[in-house]
Image: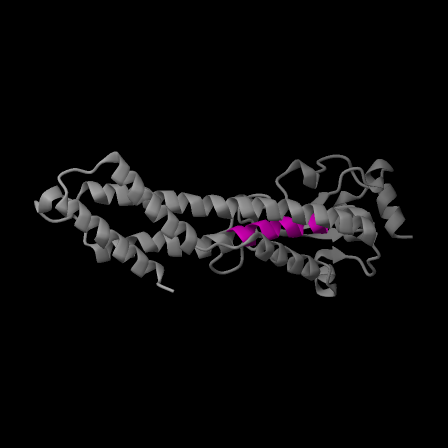
Amino acid sequence: MMSLYKQLFYFFKSVEEQILKSNKITNDRLSSWQDELFNILNTSVVFFTQNQIRNSFVQLLKKNLSLSSFKKNFKLKNIDFNRARLSAQAKDFLNEHVLISVNLIKLHRDEQIQATLRRFSGWISSIPSMGEGKPSQSIKSLSRDLLKPLHSLNFENRRVLIDQGHKFTSAVNNAIAKDQGAIAVKWVSHWKEEGYNYRPDHKKPDGHIYLIRDNSFVKNGFIKKMNIQYIDDIDGFGQLPFCRCYGIYLFNLRDLPIDMLTEKGKKYING
């Protein structure tokens, strides 16, 4: 099968020859060229299929439900969640993020194809008819330039999957935490990671503990109600684009800093 570069090269060469021999470019001819270029791009510019994307999230879900993931995200000795309920929730999360990912990837692909068509039309306008002069850009140069953004699509597609993967992971972990009765969550940022372009406002909460709303320890006076910060009052882990922060969920009053507890709470943890 002919490479995309060769398909573009021979197509542009044909168009150039037709223009150099003609005295004008008609609307029908321009539409015909654009349709032909669109068909070349539409059949040659590949992107992840819905099945590939779904398989990616299925594998991510298996990873989320592994022992190593539990140890990383939950400060709890034994996890015995309602698997039927989690399975139903996880399926909804998975379907949602597959749908979003497919849509984003398709939009990126369509945008690049449309940008290529616009660039092509601009190139046509630079070709003098009836052989009077030379085109502003050679066919080889044009073919290479138009391939650059198309080649970057694979990278952009993977960025979409990575970003949606963080959001999916966050949703699944939150569902498990609620099922297990988590009372708080500790924010973990990657700001110390070399080369990571972290958000400055996500460096600040690193190590900070946020409470889960409606937990019984707050209601029953074990935790101070002054200066309480709930995780659902802020943008959570992975919600903003390309955020890689995550949370360690806490289930025991003893896991909270002592200054968060009331006298009643201190007596409780001291037996």
Closer-to-camera residue (56/65): 56
Residue at 29% in and 44% down: 33
- The part of the chain drawn in magenta is 160-173
Which residue corresponds to the image point at 82% horizontal and 51% vertical from the top-left?
84
Q: Position of residue 199 (x, y in %)?
A: 51, 47
| Of the pair 83 and 269, the residue shown nearer to us | 83
In the rendered view, tell whether residue 69 sits above or below residue 185.
Answer: below
Q: Is residue 89 magenta?
A: no
Horizontal side, residue 254 vs residue 59: left or right: right
Residue 225 horizontal side relative to residue 29, left or right: right
When the figure is inspected, residue 151 is found, relative to residue 227, above or below; the finding is below
20 sits to left or right of 93: left
From the image, give the main secondary structure of the stretch colored magenta: helix
The x, y position of residue 88, in whole percent, is: 77, 48
In-image side of 30 versus 54 (left or right)? left
Residue in the picture at 17% in, 51% down? 17
Residue 208 visible in the snapshot: no
Residue 207, x across and y down, in percent = 65, 51
